[in-house]
Amino acid sequence: MAAKKQTTAKKPAVAAKRAPRGKKPAPAARKPAATAKKVPSGKKPATAASRTGQTHRPPRPAKAGDPARMQPPLLKTLYAEHRHIASVMQLFREQLKAIEAGELVDTHVVYEIMDYMVTWPDRFHHPREDLIYGRVAELDAEAADSVDSLQRDHDFMAGKGREVLRNIQLWRDGELGGTALVKSGRAYIDHMYEHMNTEEKLVFPQIEEVLAAEDWLELAKDDQLRPVADPVFGQRVQREFRNMARKLRSSVRRGVERGTLVEWLAIEAVMESLDVVSMAYESARDTAGEHLRLAWDEGLELFRESAVTAPWRFAANNARLGLRLVQQVAEISRDALGDISRVNQERKDRVRLMDSQAGQ
């Protein structure tokens, strides 16, 4: 089975090869035959940079990431594929944890995870990113270094992916221990997350700033950027990845169930907290009412005793009663905050208990 997967995992040649340092990279996403017909001889193809006479476009009115700005379909696809890769990496992390704990795992699932990474992201997702990155490097010299680093990292990760896949096969054959597999697998996962975070936080916003609508239209015409059905997250799951797909769906169901329970516990905690606040309000209101009645009764008594000194004695008495009221309301508030804290702690304890039971 391993030999079969390795032959299918060969990375096709794409137009995303980097030019040597110091030279301007050739347009990565153009088809030579198509562009040669349109450009008169002796003239340089009119890129977006040459049309404006700049190497870097000025900022657009709508910033990258602004909800009011429509994301290009190709960029949306890259974000969606990142979410798919992240879900696969999460499943891989769970499998490695089980291997480390000495638990029984489905070896087919473990193999299919890395077979998918070598077959799909390394052959289609990363090369497509490289084509887009190549266009960005043409138009923005400031982005060239970041793009070059990410493109070289794509090659590095492809090699590491094949290495982890070989380790999994050796582990299945009993020629490699679980500890070594877990170590190499976790290093791959961590690097993949770091790489995707760099792309989404630094490079994807630059892509949105640099590429104009005409650039995206031209890129969309490139055959190597055409949509290719994902063998796991597409409309139909390929047979060789059915075990992994089943595990992924099971994880999604568990996540939904957990999310629903956590949401219900949160709602229940909010309702209990509202009850605490309501009772504290009623207690404070009743206490304030008692103080007002007491102040009124004692004030009348002071006036009966002496109308001349009553105003001063009345003010002093009210100050004393007011201070007592403030102290009692503060005590009620402290008790209410303590009750709310206990309600919230109980919710956290129940969530932890639920997670521990799910992990058993």
Image (cartoon, rainbow, N blue to C red):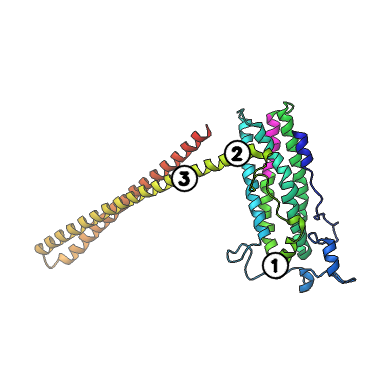
Q: Which residue is mark 2?
A: 246
* Residue type beneath disc 3: Thr
Relative placement, left or right, of 121 versus 24 is left
Q: Which residue is mark 1?
A: 213
* Residue type beneath disc 2: Arg
Q: Residue 100 location in percent, x, y?
A: 63, 31
**Mark found first going from the N terminus, 2 or 3:** 2
Q: Which residue is mark 3?
A: 260
**Mark found first going from the N terminus, 1 or 3:** 1
Q: Residue 321 location in percent, x, y?
A: 23, 57
Contact flag, marks 2 and 1 (Cβ < 8 Å): no
Task: Name which quarter of the figure residue 32 lies in.
Answer: bottom right
Up/down of 74 relative to 162, above or below: below
Distance from Cα at disc 2 to Cα at disc 3: 21 Å
**Mark found first going from the N terminus, 2 or 1:** 1
Q: Residue furthest top?
A: 174
Distance from Cα at disc 2 to Cα at disc 1: 39 Å
Q: Which residues are magenta?
A: 178-190
Q: Residue at x 15, y 59 (%)?
A: 298
* Residue type beneath disc 1: Ala
In this orientation, does residue 200 appear?
no
